[in-house]
Image: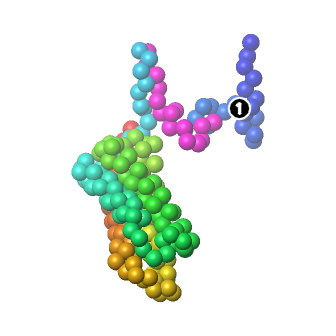
Amino acid sequence: MQEDVSHYASPSTGRALTMAQRKKGRRAYLDSFHQTPSGDYIYTGATYSLANGSGRTAVRLAVLGAAAVAAEAAAGCFSAPGTGRCFYILLPYAAALIACVLAAWAAVRLAAGGVRLRQYVYDGTVKKLPRRTLAAAVLAGAAALGETVYLLLHGPEGLALGAAAYLLCQLGAAAAMLALRGAVLRLEYREER
């Protein structure tokens, strides 16, 4: 009895697709793992080794990511004018916090991988971090700009110290994300098989 594989057929050729061709999404990297006779799985895919740095370089990236998340979280703890009721301050702040967390998570994955990264870790960290960090920096800048606009329109409302702390935290998060981006762009990885 043969299994019906027509739902796995290519629309253009009608031939059955291999497992690698079917898995184009999140779990495509699983094709790089193969089972040994003892039942263990080994990774047989491409790896990338760091050519211009050490394990400390990756740890510094994780520290920069954590600093940005800490600055964004601290910004939310200050009582600054407009932060409780103004959409053009709250929306960029929330988006910047999420973007910083995503970038920091990628930096931690990069640091955990060390100097030799598997292809799926390389694709999820080194390739994506420059865009994620740039987005986080832009959003943190937008949150600072929103607070500045609010201050210009309504004044400090007796919360000048909170406004200054909020702005410093936003600018600190943006600076940490830009420093992280620069550090990632300077990394050089070489593909190994």
Q: Secondary structure at mark 1?
A: helix
- Residue 43 image offset from top left, x and y in percent: 41, 31
- Seen from the viewer's position, the closer of residues 37 and 153 is 153
Q: In this rendered view, identify the residue nearer to me: 180 or 14.
A: 180
On the image, the x and y values in percent for residue 67 come to: 32, 60
Q: Residue at 39% of width from left, 38% of height from top?
A: 193
In the rendered image, residue 25, in percent from the top left (x then y), is placed at: 58, 42
Residue bounds of the magenta highlight: 22-37
Give the side of residue 91 with respect to residue 136, left or right: right
Asked if the stretch drawn in magenta spans residue 164, the answer is no
Residue 115 pos. (x, y %): 29, 45
Residue 177 shows in this picture: no
**Residue 33 included in the magenta stretch of the image:** yes
Q: Residue at x 41, y 50 (%)?
A: 105
The residue at 47%/33% (across/down) is: 32
x 39%, y 61%: residue = 73
Quadrant in which residue 100 is drawn: bottom left
Judging by the rendered image, the residue that carries numbered circle 1 is 8
Q: Is residue 6 above or below residue 129?
A: above
- Left or right of 163, for residue 82: right
The answer to whether 90 appears left or right of 10 in the picture is left
